[in-house]
Image: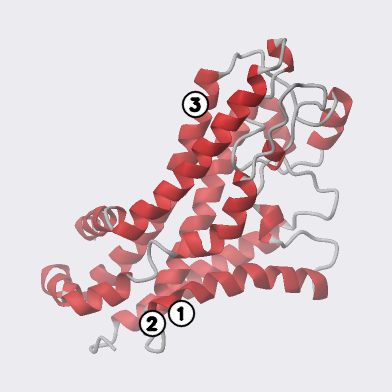
Amino acid sequence: MIRSVQTHTKRILTTLPAILTFAVLFGLVLYNFVGQVLTNAVVREASQMNDPMRVLTLSQESSMTLSQEDGLNFYSLANTYLLLLYPALVSFPVCSLWISDRGSGMVNYFDARSGRRAFWFGKLIAVFLSTFVIFTLPFLLEILLGIFSFPASAKGSPGTDYLRTIQDERLYFMPELLGKSTVLYAVVMTLLFGLVSGIFGCFTYACSTLPFMRFRVLNFLPVIVLLYGGILLQGVFFQGTQLKYLVLMKMFFPQTGGKYPIPLYAGILAGLLLISAGIIFLRSGKDELS
């Protein structure tokens, strides 16, 4: 099983869709980073510069400026582009894996080497690990860039004054962690973003193995329907909560428009994992590759 996971992970990470997805994410990170450098460059005092952790690509505050009095007003669209493209990006690296395996004879090869169950579940674990790496590494690199590129005294919060920042921080997800360190908060939130992305990747791969999902374009639909379905569920069944993925996947976003129902989110993610594992278990028991 371990060898199967290693082989599949390496193979997935070196495929063209995975490389292109990483390139897009890293391109958004560089675009946002360069813009924030230019914004901080015109600030006279280091202590008034934007805190680099608050203007990361995943941050709600990356599209704001420190103040309207500065000579350069940079409004980063990286976060907006990322969230709009996310449903397609998270599906792209794995949406055609099963089609490729079925056409190349990879299933029969691993059946003979390690067994059918080991192939299927090894591939599922590899999908999770690969998607996790693709959707965390660019943003962890951005955190490192921010640490080494900006002075430690840069603690400004773009578009807000100090009192407003303190009040808003009480409404953030995991405010205790944020109070200890913005760097640690950013790292944990990035890892959670990668974890969720890995689960969506597993769900995409599992759905792609179903007999009626014969075309690559269809394999984008499960995650797209799931994420945009949260908008409908929020308006009909869960009013007063935040189920829009455009809101959920943002750092430094205050809960002014609703609450984060953590048990509901955890249940949905656990359910997606169980569904994915169930589909793989059923498919691995089939003798045919249809």
* Amino acid found under the numbered disc labelled 1: Leu
Residue drawn 45% across the image and 70% down it: 204
Marked residue nearer the N-terminal end (1 or 3) = 3
Are there few (<14), some (14-19), or many (20+) residues within 10 Å of tag 3? some
Relative depth, front residue between 86 and 229: 86
* Residue 288 relative to residue 145: left or right: left
Q: Amino acid at mark 3?
A: Leu
In the rendered view, would you say 151 is above or below 193? above
On the image, the x and y values in percent for residue 164 come to: 87, 30
Of callouts 2 and 3, which one flags the residue occurring earlier in the amino acid sequence?
Answer: 3
Q: Quadrant of residue 253?
A: top right
Residue drawn at x 83%, y 36% as measured from the top left: 168
Q: Which mark is residue 215?
A: 2
Q: Which residue is mark 1?
A: 218
The residue drawn where x is 50% and y is 33% is 142
Secondary structure of the residue carrying numbered label 1: helix
**Mark 3 sits on what residue?**
145
- Secondary structure category for the residue under label 2: loop
